[in-house]
Image (spheres, coloured by chain):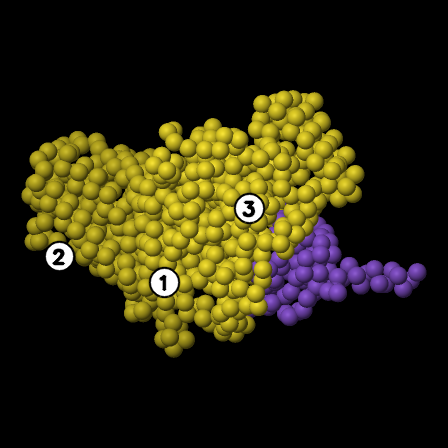
């Protein structure tokens, strides 16, 4: 990589990313550090006309790492990550009004042997609170340049660039000796540990050796001890033991105490406190916003407004996208000659692009609100209020917003887990989000409940049996999700309990530029990284439903499931429509899936998908499905709402075939391919599909859709991860296929088990 | 002797989780697992640091405290590991 590399590190809530943005602008690329669930942001900038790469490291309070994701900061700065360029200088961003704790990390960074520049961000707020900081004295004590900046207003950035350029051109690099005054025993021990590291060819800065000694059981020990010689390993462990018995305290404790004592000493000389040192209007705002009674009410009100705005705002746009893609794909289908090509482009590729873009409106809306709530400081309060609800299952208040979002759509919900710092909690939340009944499940629920659950009134007509069943399937996901998180935290995600410590920063007026930046990056990230996977999955499933083509008919290439799926995708808005109107939603949006179904009689049965369904019939039997239901369920794995369309395709055609020669499918066999012939479409509305399902039987004449079978199918839909885009976004946020694939397998088993129990229990009871 | 034992018990009972909103103390020491102690140290709960409880969450837990000049939410379970002495 050409150009110098500067790592930007700092505490959370210091405006670190704002400083990073000020230095790089929009020239950023995000990704994941391989193997860990840590976002990796790189940006390009210039210092003195020379190109410089900036790395935005995850916000952290300390370099002591307990898990691999916390290890990233130390490893990147010390050049221990092969996939990253070696770092030439470190920019430590500190909150000027909270120096005591912020300098804790800065002094640690200063010990890693690289030149350090400290940016005192939000200097304006500190000054308004009456803090006068002598940056020169502070820099002298720390042994590095200290620059006051206000990144929000882009103030002090030029001076910061100058200091960074000077640090990069300084040939001496970082200072070997720490600024903090440690007990001699500790200094001796660190020096000896440094020798062991040098002997093994590892980076041997003071900080590295100190971390190895201090963080007993920590992540550095796990990765560093094994690469030392066995003598070196014994030496390090013996050093730790000797030093701790000499100090009569743990090294970690002595380190923290020495650091804080030293910081307090130098701040006494460098900072003059005025009268107005309290938090100003934050104290007043908190008196209301986290008040015992008013707090939860306001919180519920804010959440309601946010989610109403997200769905009300994105729904019309989603419908526009949906219609535009439906029209465009119909036009392409008609315009492109050649059956396979036109279907691939119209339904495989455009369907895939459509199902990427359709998720953008809610993603951008949610990103906007999360950025707003985070930027102004309310997010921490929301977690503070909700924490107790999630504590018992190993999650925290920070899981609330992702889980709530999951009831709309899992894709933005999983993107929202990025606000959770603990990687264990982030993964656990990501894994249970798909259990929330998203809006795409609603068409499936509505079809099955509408057709098979009797509309029996309860409590004098206030509640109906249909509504109760719908409520039941919504609750089912939640009821299983939290114990699932509890189980995950005790098994695969088991790790040492870490204290839940949540900083409650001062409230700040949100900056449009920062928020716009965050929203833009999230949208771009989704389209580029998850979009490509979604597109690929769509094409694969298109092919499974399209091939083999045994008797090609001219210009009829519309894999039934896919044409229908395009009209079914954008369902995020329906949950809210339904709630506000109190009715069952229209299952069949804009165009009826059943209309498109007739485009290709028998195609789905003959396709690889249909063959899969037939051969898997023994698996479907115990849950009461025949191969037709099973095929529809399999076809719906990329997007669960497809099940409605797929059932339409299969049951209509079956029905037509049984009814004999006068059926639409057969009599129109050669002209229906044009697919937009209004003549026979209106026969096949939702009523028709309901009726078909109600009439469907096993070969022996027994009804297929019995109450236990329908209940089982509802349970299956509630618990199954039938959503390709969710898998793609899970891979994106966890950095590997391991989690999405495990979640997929686990939820499929869970859904099957749930359907099995429901069906068998129902059969036994009835 | 008996009096001493009692007062020792009283001393260890004086922990952060026992403070009510508005009450103050000075960190005396930390108990619990080494890694949890380290995290608390890093966040500013070092011996000698003054702490003050601001309020409890509406659901009763966690509690909002001021330590090292900033505000922090900490669960009672974790606050139980922070033993205090009364401010001078």
Closer to the chain start, of discs 2 and 1, is: 1
For the C terminus of chain A, the quadrant is bottom left
Nearest the camera: A544 or A257?
Answer: A257
Q: Position of residue A495 (x, y in %)?
A: 59, 43
SS under mark 1: helix
| Residue corresponding to mark 2 | A682
Q: Chain of mark 1?
A: A
Packing grade of label 1 (10 A; few <14, some 14-19, many >=20) is some
In the image, is A595 to the left or to the right of A219? left
- Rendered residue at 75%/65% (across/down): B88
Marks 1 and 3 close (CB-CB < 8 Å): no
SS under mark 2: helix
Can you see residue A719? no
Rendered image quadrant of residue A583: bottom left
Closer to the chain start, of discs 1 and 3, is: 3
| Residue corresponding to mark 3 | A139
Q: Position of residue A462 (x, y in %)?
A: 37, 75
Q: Chain of mark 3?
A: A
| Residue corresponding to mark 1 | A307
The answer for how far apart the CA atoms under marks 1 and 3 are is 47 Å
Chain A, hue in figure: yellow
Q: Are the numbered discs 2 and 1 placed on the same chain, yes or no?
A: yes
SS under mark 3: helix
């Amino acid at each position: 990589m050409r150009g110098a590399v500067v790592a930007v590190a700092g505490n959370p809530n210091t405006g670190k990313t704002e400083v990073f943005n000020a230095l790089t602008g929009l020239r950023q690329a995000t990704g994941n550090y391989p193997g860990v669930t840590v976002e990796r942001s790189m940006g390009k900038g210039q210092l003195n006309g020379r190109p410089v790469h900036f790395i935005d490291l995850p916000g952290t309070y300390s370099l002591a790492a307990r898990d691999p994701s916390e290890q990233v900061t130390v490893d990147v700065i010390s050049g221990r990550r092969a996939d990253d360029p070696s770092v030439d200088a470190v920019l430590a961003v500190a909150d000027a009004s909270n120096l005591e704790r912020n300098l804790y990390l800065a002094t640690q960074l200063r010990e890693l042997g690289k030149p350090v520049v400290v940016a005192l961000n939000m200097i304006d707020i500190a000054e308004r609170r009456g803090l006068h900081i002598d940056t020169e004295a502070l820099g002298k004590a720390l042994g590095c340049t200290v620059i006051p900046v206000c990144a929000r207003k882009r103030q002090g950035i030029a001076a910061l660039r100058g200091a960074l350029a000077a640090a990069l051109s300084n040939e001496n690099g970082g200072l070997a000796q720490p600024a903090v005054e440690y007990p001699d025993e500790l200094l001796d021990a660190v020096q000896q540990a440094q020798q062991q590291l040098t002997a093994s060819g590892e980076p041997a800065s003071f900080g590295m050796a100190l971390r190895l000694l201090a963080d007993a059981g920590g992540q550095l020990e796990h990765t560093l001890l094994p690469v030392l010689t066995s003598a070196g390993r014994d030496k390090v462990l013996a050093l730790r033991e000797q030093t701790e018995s000499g100090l009569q305290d743990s090294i970690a404790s002595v380190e923290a105490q020495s650091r804080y004592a030293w910081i307090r000493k130098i701040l006494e000389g460098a900072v003059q406190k005025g009268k107005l040192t309290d938090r100003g209007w934050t104290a007043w705002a908190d008196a209301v916003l986290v008040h015992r009674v008013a707090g939860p009410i306001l919180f519920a009100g804010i959440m309601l407004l946010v989610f109403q705005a997200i769905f009300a705002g994105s729904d019309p746009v989603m419908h526009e996208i949906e219609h535009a893609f439906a029209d465009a794909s119909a036009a392409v289908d008609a315009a492109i000659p050649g059956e396979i090509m036109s279907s691939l482009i119209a339904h495989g590729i455009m369907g895939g692009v459509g199902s990427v873009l359709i998720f953008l409106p809610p993603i951008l809306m949610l990103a906007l609100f999360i950025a707003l709530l985070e930027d102004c400081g309310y997010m921490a309060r929301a977690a503070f209020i909700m924490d107790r609800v999630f504590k018992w299952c190993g999650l925290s208040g920070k899981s609330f917003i992702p889980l709530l979002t999951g009831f709309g759509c899992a894709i933005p919900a999983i993107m929202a887990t990025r606000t959770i710092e603990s990687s264990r909690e982030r993964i656990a939340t990501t894994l249970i989000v798909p259990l929330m009944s998203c809006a795409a499940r609603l068409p499936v629920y509505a079809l099955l409940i509408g057709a098979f659950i009797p509309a029996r009134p309860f409590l004098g007509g206030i509640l109906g049996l249909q509504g109760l069943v719908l409520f039941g399937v919504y609750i089912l996901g939640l009821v299983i999700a939290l114990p699932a998180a509890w189980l995950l935290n005790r098994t695969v995600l088991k790790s040492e309990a870490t204290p839940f410590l949540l900083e409650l920063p001062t409230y700040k007026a949100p900056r449009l530029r920062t928020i716009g930046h965050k929203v833009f990056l999230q949208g771009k990230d989704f389209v580029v990284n998850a979009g490509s996977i979604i597109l690929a999955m769509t094409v694969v499933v298109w092919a499974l439903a399209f091939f083999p083509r045994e008797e090609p008919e001219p210009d009829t290439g519309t894999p039934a499931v896919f044409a229908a799926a395009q009209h079914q995708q954008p369902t995020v808005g329906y949950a809210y429509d339904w709630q506000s109107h109190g009715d069952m939603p229209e299952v069949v949006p804009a165009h009826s899936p059943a209309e498109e179904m007739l485009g290709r009689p028998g195609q789905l049965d003959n396709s690889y998908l249909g063959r899969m369904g037939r051969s898997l019939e023994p698996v479907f039997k115990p849950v009461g499905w025949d191969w037709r239901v099973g095929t529809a369920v399999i076809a719906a794995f990329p997007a669960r709402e497809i099940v409605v369309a797929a059932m339409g395709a299969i049951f209509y055609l079956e029905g037509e075939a049984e009814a004999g020669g006068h059926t639409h499918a057969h009599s129109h066999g050669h002209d229906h391919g044009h697919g937009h012939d209004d003549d026979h479409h209106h026969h096949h509305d939702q009523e028709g599909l309901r009726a078909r399902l109600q009439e469907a039987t096993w070969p022996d004449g027994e009804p297929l859709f019995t109450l236990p079978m329908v209940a089982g199918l509802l349970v299956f839909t509630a618990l199954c991860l039938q959503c390709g885009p969710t898998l793609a976004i899970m891979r994106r946020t966890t950095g590997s296929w391991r989690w999405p694939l495990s979640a997929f397998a686990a939820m499929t088993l869970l859904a099957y088990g749930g359907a099995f129990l429901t069906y068998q229990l129902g059969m036994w009871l009835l | 002797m008996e009096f001493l034992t009692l007062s020792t018990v009283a001393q260890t009972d004086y922990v952060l989780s026992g403070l009510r909103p508005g009450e103050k103390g000075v960190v005396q020491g930390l108990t619990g697992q080494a890694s949890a102690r380290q995290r608390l140290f890093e966040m500013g709960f070092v011996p000698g640091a003054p702490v003050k409880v601001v309020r409890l969450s509406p659901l009763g837990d966690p509690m909002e405290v001021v330590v090292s000049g900033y505000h922090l939410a900490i669960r009672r379970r974790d606050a139980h590991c922070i033993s205090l002495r009364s401010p001078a």
